[in-house]
Image: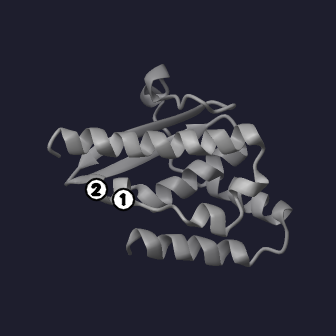
Amino acid sequence: MDINAVQENIIEEFSSFEDWMDKYAYLIELGNNLDTFPEEHRKDENLIEGCQSKVWFHAEYKDDKIYFYADSDAIITKGIASLLIRVLSGRTPQEIIDADLFFIEKIGLQQHLSPTRANGLLAMIKQLKYYAMAYKSMGK
């Protein structure tokens, strides 16, 4: 499934909820379902700068694709990270660089986040794209 199809699925899932309390509950559920984040990756260089809470992202390059892993000490932020992983993990560096993450606006996420969380979301996206640019520049 390509990036846009995954985003359309996310939009459809969120459209089934009436209000934002239900959407937040779903985000929390998604975050709770994230794969366990290995303790050895919980280090300062994997922290996302610009986030109010602590958010760690780790990237691995295998078979011409980048796989992301994340964790956060904030449950909603962890859910947001899980959505980004769902859309971008397992993609080539170029797919990640070119990705237009339209699902964020379509589900109303950015409008329903506090300014500091919205900044954190942008910082997470920027970091994932930086990982992609770094792997691409290394000829991977």
Please, is residue 136 above or below residue 20 in the view?
above
Q: Which mark is residue 94?
A: 2
Q: Quadrant of residue 61?
A: top left
Quadrant assignment, res 17: bottom right
Image quarter (top left, top right, bottom left or bottom right) of the N terminus: bottom left
Check disc 1: other Cα within 10 Å, few if <14, some if 14-19, many if 20+.
few
Query: Which secondary structure lies at badge 1?
Result: helix
Q: Give above or below for 105 relative to 127.
A: below
Specify whether 75 is left or right of 42.
right
Q: Residues within 10 Å of mark 2 (few under 14, many from 20)?
A: some
Query: Residue 124 got which mark?
Result: none
Q: Vertical placement of 82 versus 26: above or below?
A: above
User: Which amino acid type corresponds to the residue marked 1 in the rendered image?
Assistant: Asp
Give the residue type that dot 2 points to.
Gln
> Which of these two is toward me, 55 or 136?
136
Q: Position of residue 25 (x, y in %)?
A: 78, 59
- Residue 98: give its label: 1
Q: Tell me whether circle 1 and circle 2 mark residues in contact (CB < 8 Å).
A: yes
Say whether residue 5 is left or right of residue 20: left
- Residue that lies at the very extreme toward the left in this rendered image: 139
Residue at 42% of width from left, 37% of height from top?
58
Q: Residue at x 48, y 71 (%)?
A: 6
Q: Percent x, y for residue 50?
A: 60, 30
Locate residue 67, reporting x and y percent: 36, 50
Q: Is residue 76 visible?
A: yes
Disc 2 is placed on an element classified as: helix
6 relative to 121 in the view: left or right: left
**Rendered residue at 55%/39% (across/down):** 123
Q: Residue at x 19, y 54 (%)?
A: 63
